[in-house]
Amino acid sequence: MTKAIQTMNNTSTSRTPINRRLDLIGWAVILLILIGTPLAVGLFRTPPEKGPIKDPSVLIMFLTYLSGIILFSLATWGGIAVGRVKSISDKSGLTGTGGNLVNLLSKFLGGLFIISGFVKLQDVVGFGIKLDDYWAVFQDAIPAFPAAFMRTLSVPLAGFVSVFEVVLAFALMTGYRMRITSLLLMLMLLFFTFLTGYSAITNTVTDCGCFGDALKLTPYQSFTKDIILVITCLPIYLLRKRIQPYYRAPIPLLATFGSFAIFAFISYYTYQHLPIFDFRGPYQAGQDLEYNSTNFDEEEGIIIAHDFYDFCGSCGQNGFEGPALYYVLYNVEKAPQEALDAALELERVLRTEAPGIKVCGGTNSRKQTRQYIKDNTSAAFCLDISDEKVLKTMVRSTPGFIFVMDGIVIKKWHYNDMPTVPELRELAGPQADQGPAPTLPEPEAAPPVPDSLATDSVTVDSVSGAVDSTANPTGA
């Protein structure tokens, strides 16, 4: 009987209600930072007349949450030192002060994981590109590392890790199964610390991709951030057995698994369409590609869109005048064949129904695929060879589409939302019908071929530009 009473007393002590008022204030602060920061930045920021709009919202939220994590972690350690939280060896539970401090620490940590995870989960292709960089680095260090196989898993892994971050955030903020939650938290932080530490030491991956394209951190900044997080999260891990759910069942369960369902759906939806928020500055809707590809970024010291060039340059056209539809075709061999065929059919139809819209594209695909594209489009279709990363930066879809008007990016489409001819005509306006009439120069008489060169003539491949010295000058 005495033992049972003691057990009940311990349970009662371990489940001492936290300060509900403070808990609500914690939630309000987290939501205020998440929602209020972008609104305040948008209200007070003066966008430049030309060039990408540099939005500091994610940076401000990151620094705010990190400051809160450090503050409440230090307060928790101080509380342990003076006995206000109870020592780590005390199994009877947390005091009210200890519960409040751990609660606030978990709230701010959850807020940081929400912005980090959400930025990545709505752009898993971009995060997958960053994972590809890590696989290449590992293969350089360990030749036996299966980098080619891992690249096939990059996008699924990117989606899983990003959604996992957000789910972990809600588990922390509601106190759901803290023993397993705190363990997963430490394992994830240690894993990222290894990645960023290796990158910082070897100076191979220049951006960890922790916040996608929304916030660029150098390898040492990323490594320092992860070291701080590991140290500041130790109180949660060490006190895990005495941290009880802050809310009655089934709220923590519903919050954890509900967040998984919601954010997994968002991740899948944005992968099948396009990211909700486009953080790739030089190629966002409203950006002037002509300006971005010819002017310097004063902070970076390089051309703003240093990896972009005029798609239609090799065709003798100016892609920055009038309406143009850019086709983005990276790794087309892995794209659905029906999507590629529909894209090529759209180009052929546009030549007759909207001749004023120039259509051109870029691809990193092999020669056979480029030839297939050439064979299934009109002679006016301009196809240049482009770098894969440039194409993926422009739009996260293959085939993908970008409508540009006088050099200004108007709209982008995933191949699942392929634009229609009436939609493109509406965007182009009257210029959709103002295409130049095709004219062909008068053929000139071919100069006589010297006998000494009759068997040494060469031709240039119309797709790859390669010289073929085995071609027969007679055409036979």
Image: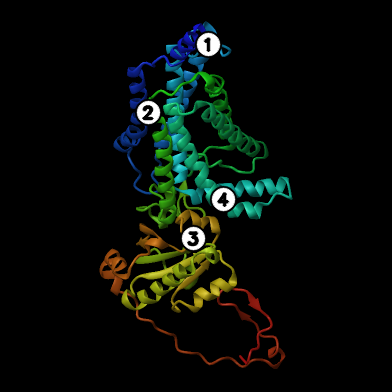
Nearest-to-viewer mark from 2 and 3: 2
Determine the CA span between mark 2 and mark 1: 25 Å
Circle 2 is placed at which residue position? 30
Nearest-to-viewer mark from 4 and 3: 4
Q: Earlier in the sequence, mark 2 or mark 3?
A: 2
Is 436 placed above or below 263 here?
A: below
User: Which disc, if any, is residue 154?
Assistant: 4
SS at circle 4 = helix
Q: Earlier in the sequence, mark 1 or mark 3?
A: 1
Is 476 placed above or below 68 here?
A: below
Circle 3 is placed at which residue position? 309
SS at circle 2 = helix
Question: Does residue 98 appear left or right of residue 23 in this picture?
Answer: right
Circles 4 and 2: CB atoms closer than 8 Å: no
Taking the spot 46% from the left edge, 58% from the top edge, the residue there is: 397
Q: Which amino acid does label 1 sit on?
A: Ile
Q: Which of marks 2 and 1 is nearer the N terminus?
A: 2
Q: What residue type is labelled 3?
A: Tyr
Q: What residue type is labelled 2?
A: Ile
The picture places residue 45, in percent across and down from the top left corner, at 33, 37
Circles 1 and 3: CB atoms closer than 8 Å: no
Circle 1 is placed at which residue position? 80
Residue at the far right in the pictured view: 143
SS at circle 3 = loop
Determine the CA span between mark 4 and mark 2: 31 Å
The picture places residue 1, in percent across and down from the top left corner, at 49, 8
Determine the CA span between mark 2 and mark 3: 42 Å
Q: Which of marks 4 and 1 is nearer the N terminus?
A: 1
Q: How crowded is the residue under tag 3: few (<14 C-alpha within 10 Å), some, or many (20+)?
A: some
